[in-house]
Image (spheres, helix red, strand yellow):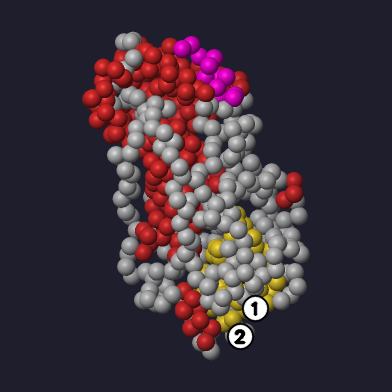
């Protein structure tokens, strides 16, 4: 193919030779998604910018940590971004949570949060998410966008922890099928 | 539940959401490390979650901040010269800890704050050529004749020199789009079948020889004065007038801009060596007013300067604005 575009994996290989254009191209392809997940979770542009920077600087510094056999680059970058964002949010909110524990973990709070998170989704993704039963949709949104642990989600929803776990699992499977039905593409 | 014949399916899903904590998380990670089936299942969940994210344009300063930190990691070695150029980025990066940010900032329901303030670009003007070019781009020779069929690359523009033109959508409406093959085209006539390795410019690692005190502009000026240096005139493809000079002095190389149209922050000039194997990046030149250190060309052949999205491209995508013949080791200047 005469105009073959370098694949993501090619670009990561080029990072091994310290190619800034390769990093720029990776940023062009995935920076918007990394930023988006960081901002959704952090709810703060400064924290989200820190997360975004850290993800790409880390990729530059240690490109060998990405294993193309295990994940796509996009999925891996988003996993990095989400993990870092959740760490930031938890370290902050754990302090506050001790103070407001009683007032915080309520079903109303869960309802409010999940409504907000769903409203922020792209149309096709929102349709897919809203096709799930609330019992599956809510813990997934609370965990992924709210940065809550499954225990917190269970507390907020007033459900046993084991039940919430299994609903997260069944919900993720249903979500994948619903997204496929919507034709969602990265 | 980590019995060998029973995989922790529920925990895998929870872990994919980063919602597993404490001992459960530790146990799950230990299991996943040893279980290929669970790694695959976890990857499936993460693929699903990657589809949930709606892309947004990052703040204009985010990319510049990344570049600054990448440079800082390089300079941290001490023995590498401080050069405000992308060529530095080919030197061996330092391994440094990644900061975790300010954890005292607002939590999950904090108001979305304003973007970080713009910061000035660094860069040095040697001969005061800033603004000397004619207004507006006037490409004569477009080596990517089919780019008109590609989707536009929306580029969030800011005073700080924004991130590279993004493929994300800046608005809230419209379907997610993965802008693909339309934008990137082969450089027709210059070895279009270039291998990726060559197109990415895998020149040798370059460690400059100076102590780091002189600025790039001073180093380039000294190189121009050196009778042993090679100077290649890069002529404008529009009118043939001198646009820039490529100066090779020993193991160092620079581009001194004479007359290029200054670009806005969303674009950059980039220098290419057009060898037999296809175009190789010699360095990102910035907006057209800086003197920059670049890679030394590896052989005789054409040099070209093209316009690219900020941050540079892995292979030429934009209009070639200037070019010249580099005669290898011959002294042409």
Of A41 and B209, nearer the camera is A41
Which residue was labeled with disc 2? B333
Q: CA distance from mark 2 to mark 1?
A: 9 Å
- The spot of residue B79 in percent (x, y) is 33, 70
Which residue was labeled with disc 1? B233
Residue B190 belongs to magenta span: no
Secondary structure at badge 2 equals loop
- The spot of residue B310 in percent (x, y) is 57, 55
Q: B90 above or below A57?
A: below
Ranked by sequence position, the earlier of labels 2 and 1 is 1
For residue A184, say whether it is visible: yes
Q: Which residues are magenta?
A: A123-134
Q: Are marks 2 and 1 in contact (CB under 8 Å)?
A: yes
Secondary structure at badge 1 equals strand
**Which residue is at a point 55% across and 22% down the rendered structure image?**
A126
| Mark 2, other Cα within 10 Å: few <14 / some 14–19 / many ≥20 | few
**Which residue is at a point 51% across and 38% down the rendered structure image?**
A33
């Amino acid at each position: 193919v005469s105009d073959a575009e370098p694949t993501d994996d090619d670009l990561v290989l080029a990072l091994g030779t310290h190619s800034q254009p390769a990093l720029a191209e990776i940023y062009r392809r995935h920076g918007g998604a990394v930023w988006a997940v960081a901002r959704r979770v952090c709810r703060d542009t400064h924290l989200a910018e820190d997360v975004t920077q850290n993800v790409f600087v880390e990729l530059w510094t240690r490109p060998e940590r990405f294993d193309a056999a295990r994940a796509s680059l996009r999925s891996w970058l988003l996993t990095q971004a989400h993990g870092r964002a959740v760490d930031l949010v938890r370290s902050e909110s754990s302090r506050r949570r001790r103070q407001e524990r009683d007032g915080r973990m309520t079903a109303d709070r869960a309802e409010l949060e999940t409504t907000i998170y769903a409203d922020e989704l792209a149309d096709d993704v929102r349709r897919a998410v809203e096709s799930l039963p609330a019992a599956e949709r809510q813990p997934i949104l609370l965990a992924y966008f709210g940065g809550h642990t499954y225990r917190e989600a269970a507390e907020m929803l007033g459900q046993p922890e084991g039940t919430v776990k299994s609903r997260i699992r069944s919900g993720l499977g249903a979500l994948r099928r619903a997204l496929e039905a919507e034709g969602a593409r990265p | 539940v980590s019995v060998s014949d029973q995989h922790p399916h529920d925990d895998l899903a929870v872990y994919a959401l980063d919602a597993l904590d404490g001992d459960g998380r530790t146990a799950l990670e230990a299991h996943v490390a040893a279980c290929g089936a669970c790694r695959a299942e976890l990857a499936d969940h993460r693929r699903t979650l990657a589809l949930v994210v709606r892309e947004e344009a990052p703040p204009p300063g985010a990319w510049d901040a990344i570049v600054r930190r990448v440079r800082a990691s390089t300079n941290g070695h001490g023995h590498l010269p401080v050069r405000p150029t992308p060529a530095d980025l080919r030197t061996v990066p330092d391994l440094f800890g990644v900061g975790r940010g300010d954890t005292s900032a607002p939590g999950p329901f904090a108001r979305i704050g304003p973007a970080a303030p713009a910061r000035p670009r660094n860069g040095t003007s040697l001969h005061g050529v800033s603004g000397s070019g004619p207004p507006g781009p006037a490409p004569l020779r477009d080596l990517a004749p089919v780019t008109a069929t590609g989707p536009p690359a929306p580029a969030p523009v800011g005073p700080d020199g924004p991130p590279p033109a993004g493929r994300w959508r800046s608005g809230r409406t419209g379907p997610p789009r993965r802008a693909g093959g339309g934008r990137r085209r082969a450089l027709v006539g210059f070895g279009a079948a270039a291998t990726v390795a060559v197109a990415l410019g895998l020149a040798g690692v370059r460690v400059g020889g100076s102590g780091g005190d002189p600025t790039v502009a001073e180093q380039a000026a000294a190189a121009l004065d050196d009778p042993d240096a090679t100077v290649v005139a890069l002529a404008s493809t529009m009118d043939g007038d001198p646009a820039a000079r490529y100066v090779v002095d020993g193991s160092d190389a620079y581009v001194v801009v004479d007359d290029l149209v200054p670009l806005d922050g969303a674009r950059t000039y980039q220098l290419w060596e057009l060898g037999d194997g296809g175009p190789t990046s010699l360095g990102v030149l910035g907006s057209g007013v800086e003197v920059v250190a670049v890679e030394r060309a590896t052989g005789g052949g054409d040099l070209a300067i093209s316009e690219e999205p900020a941050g540079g491209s892995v292979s030429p995508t934009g209009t070639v604005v200037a070019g010249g013949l580099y005669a290898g080791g011959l002294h042409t200047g």
